[in-house]
Amino acid sequence: METTEKIVEAYVRYIKGWATIPNLRCAGQYEIDLLAIDPVSLDRYHIETSVSGSQNFSRLTTKAFDPELLKEKVQKAGQRRTLGFFLERKFGVPAVKAELAKYGFLDGEYRNVIVTWDWTPEAAAEAEKAGVALWSFQEIMREIAATIRHKRSYFTDDTLRTINLFVRALAAAEEKEEPAALVEPPASAAGGIQGGAAPFWVYRNWIHHRARLHRAECGYCRAGAGAQGATGNLTGEWKPFETLAEAEAFLAGLGYEDAGLCGICR
Ligand SMILES: [Zn+2]
């Protein structure tokens, strides 16, 4: 079982409070990542996780799914991130449906879910049409972190114990890492634009749902170099934009409550 699948199961069990059955083998080498049942509403879920290893930061797409390409090493990861892969190899397979039926998961009476790092707008539209819910792995991590951050209780679940440690370590590291523009800006901050860089940048913090729009020449942005000298880290990332309108649209699209223009370079 992949670590990410364990995290999703821990989330469903301990944060959602649902009953779970992980890793079901079906006829024909098919597998079900996770079944879950909400004991209150009795809603049923077939959950597949698309986040793994080096693909961690990739989005679900609507690129054509081709079983032949799935066999090619270089194409495999990309193919496994297509919506078509999930529809054809996970949700729509008769052997999978037969296994699901053994647990009382009857056609049309349960929900299909894909957990993924992110997705394209096309993938969101296609998934909705196909009746598949998309859950954000980033959101799941955030929700787990928010739930366990201030708890002093001891977790018997290994995955949650590990996440709990990670969340605490992250909180400590963040105090050093956080780009200056998201906290108190030092009076001496100054910087210059880097050659050929985009004129507008947005920094988003995934953990705290904060985002700021900067001009490239801003001392806290320095064309995305920020305070860390890199365009991404564990807690957030910089995104470049050619126009102010595009940057503002991205900012609004994040749906963060704490999102706006940098107080220094606006
Ligand atoms: Zn700024």
Image: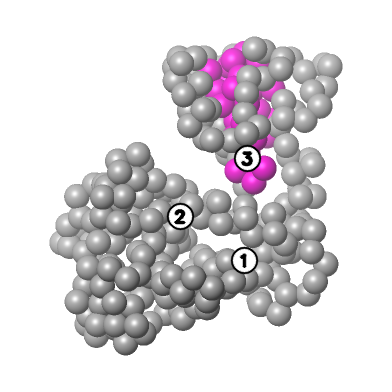
The kind of residue on which mark 1 rests is Ile
Q: CA distance from mark 2 to mark 1?
A: 14 Å
The residue at label 3 has a CB less than 8 Å from ligand 1? no
Secondary structure found at label 3: loop
Report if residue 176 is visible in the image. Answer: yes
Q: Nearer the viewer, residue 52 or 147?
A: 147
Select label 3 or label 1 by which is in front.
Answer: 1
From the viewer's perspective, tell me whether residue 64 is left or right of residue 187: left
* Mark 3 surroundings within 10 Å by alpha-carbon count, few (fewer than 14), some (14 through 19), many (20 or more): some
* Mark 1 surroundings within 10 Å by alpha-carbon count, few (fewer than 14), some (14 through 19), many (20 or more): some
Residue 3 placed where, x, y %?
Answer: 53, 69
- Which residue is under mark 1? 15
Q: Is residue 97 above or below residue 263?
A: below
Residue 264 placed where, x, y %?
Answer: 72, 15
* Mark 2 surroundings within 10 Å by alpha-carbon count, few (fewer than 14), some (14 through 19), many (20 or more): some
Give the residue drawn at x 42%, y 75%. Answer: 35
CB-based contact (under 8 Å), mark 3 and mark 2: no
Q: Nearer the viewer, residue 143 or 188?
A: 143
Is residue 214 within the magenta segment?
Answer: yes
Secondary structure found at label 2: strand
- Which residue is under mark 3? 209
**Magenta extent:** 200-228
**In this view, which residue lies farthest toward the front?**
41
The kind of residue on which mark 2 rests is Trp
Residue 38 placed where, x, y %?
Answer: 50, 72
Q: Is residue 131 above or below residue 226?
A: below
Q: Nearer the viewer, residue 228 or 45?
A: 45
- Which residue is under mark 2? 135
Give the residue drawn at x 53%, y 27%. Answer: 251
Residue 261 picture quarter: top right
